[in-house]
Amino acid sequence: MTTAGKVIKCKAAVLWEQKKPFSIEEVEVAPPKAKEVRIKILATGICRTDDHVVEGMWPSKFPVIVGHEAVGIVESIGEGVTTVKPGDKVIPLFLPQCRECKYCRNPDGNLCIMTDLKADGVMSDGTSRFTCKGETIYHFMNISTFTEYTVASEFAVAKIDDAAPSEKICLLGCAFSTGYGAAVKTGKVTPGSTCAVFGLGGVGLSVIMGCKLAGASRIIGIDLNKGKFEKAMAVGATECISPKDFTKPISEVLSEMTGDSVDYTFEVIGHLETMIDAIESCNKNYGTCVLVGIPPSGKKLSCDPMLLLFGRTLKGCIFGGCKSRDVVPKLATDFLAKKFDLDQLITHVLPFKNIQEGFELLNSGKRCLFFVALLLLLFFWWSYLFSTSYF
């Protein structure tokens, strides 16, 4: 029986208020309106940004369904949708690409005006597509992926090859694309260069992969948790160090290790202190520092302007600087062509009902991502794969 045009009842992890556990609820998902698509989620992941919402460090309306890294199948489409059709495999995009605004038309821009920067929690018409127990449930980043079904703008989905494995390719929705893009698109890492990556979670590992693919000859991974070093080396780091092993500032350590020749540094944690460390660690004249990690909302970075006066470049990036609908399908194709491997980013499996445990793992230092709602025969078998954290 077709569900197109009808309200769908399904399970979702609802966050009713800050600093409270997730609650698995039956929610109603309305049909998509004009230029919208309704998606059956096949895989989704936990990101530190989701946890920022839980802890009140990221703006959001409540109650809300968070989650923003996923893959799914288009269940139905609204009026005027032309770029995808029911049955297409897609990755929802927290950073849309309308291809018409000034940001989308600029070759170096990607912050589409349709991005939910104000955390309004509603679709473009000012309403939500989710309800639960008669109450409106708000969207997160306009895609809300901790649910069996979601609704997103046509401009916030990227069609990908059907052959792409859901439990891996969902990483393109945030972690891999952000890290890879930070190295290749924003940082523009050059062959033979030396790079230092602060933070060896999922995005940090993806930065390392991007640096390696760009031809960097030396890639230094930096993290307090030495348990992350093995994976970092497996994906391309040439060496790893922990600031705990030194009494001097990490910038001095890196300078001595490299002869003051770190060309690129990447901060992939979101801590103000490590952002300063990353700036100080790249060469003071020609070095480039890229800020990737997202700090808690409202925090301000303060540094000595002399750090930049001699020529250092400081950059920020969102989604790795990538134009989402253009880049994600290409990355999916490259993955199928075995140009990069995502297996090292996946470590744990938990059932969907244990999503709260996933966030506890995230905050315990094991820092994970979680995946996968699979339709098997006529029953939903919910399971989630966990990966090292972004930050």
Image: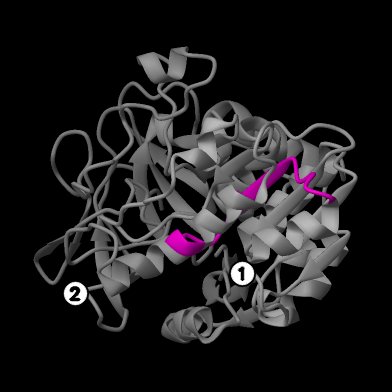
* Quarter of the image where one finds residue 55: bottom left
Element assignment for label 2: loop
Relative image position of residue 143 (x, y in whole percent):
37, 48
Residue range highlighted in magenta = 259-273
Residue 236 showing in the rendered view: no
At x 31% / y 52%, what residue is drawn? 300
Q: The disc labelled 2 sits on which kind of residue? A: Glu
- Label 1 SS: strand
Q: Quadrant of residue 132?
A: bottom left
Counting the numbered discs, the total is 2
Residue 272 in the magenta stretch? The answer is yes
Q: Which mark is residue 17?
A: 2
Q: Is residue 343 above or below residue 362?
A: above
Check disc 2: other Cα within 10 Å, few if <14, some if 14-19, many if 20+.
some
Answer whether labels 1 and 2 touch (C-beta < 8 Å). no
From the viewer's perspective, is 260 left or right of 104? right
Q: Main secondary structure of the magenta part?
A: loop
Mark 1 neighbour class, 10 Å CA radius: few under 14, some 14 to 19, many 20 or more: few
Q: Nearer the viewer, residue 310 or 49?
A: 310
Q: Position of residue 39 (x, y in %)?
A: 43, 48
Q: Quadrant of the C terminus?
A: bottom right
- Residue 376, numbered circle: 1
In this rendering, would 14 be left or right of 127?
right
Give the percent coordinates (x, y) of residue 99: 44, 17
Q: Please identify the quarter of the rendering in which residue 15 is found.
A: bottom left
Q: Nearer the viewer, residue 209 or 173?
A: 209
Q: Amino acid at mark 1?
A: Leu
- Residue 245 percent across, percent down from the top left: 73, 81
Tell me: residue 65, above or below residue 244: above
Image coloring type: one colour
Q: Which residue is more in the foreground, 68 or 217?
A: 217
Visible in this render: residue 131?
A: yes
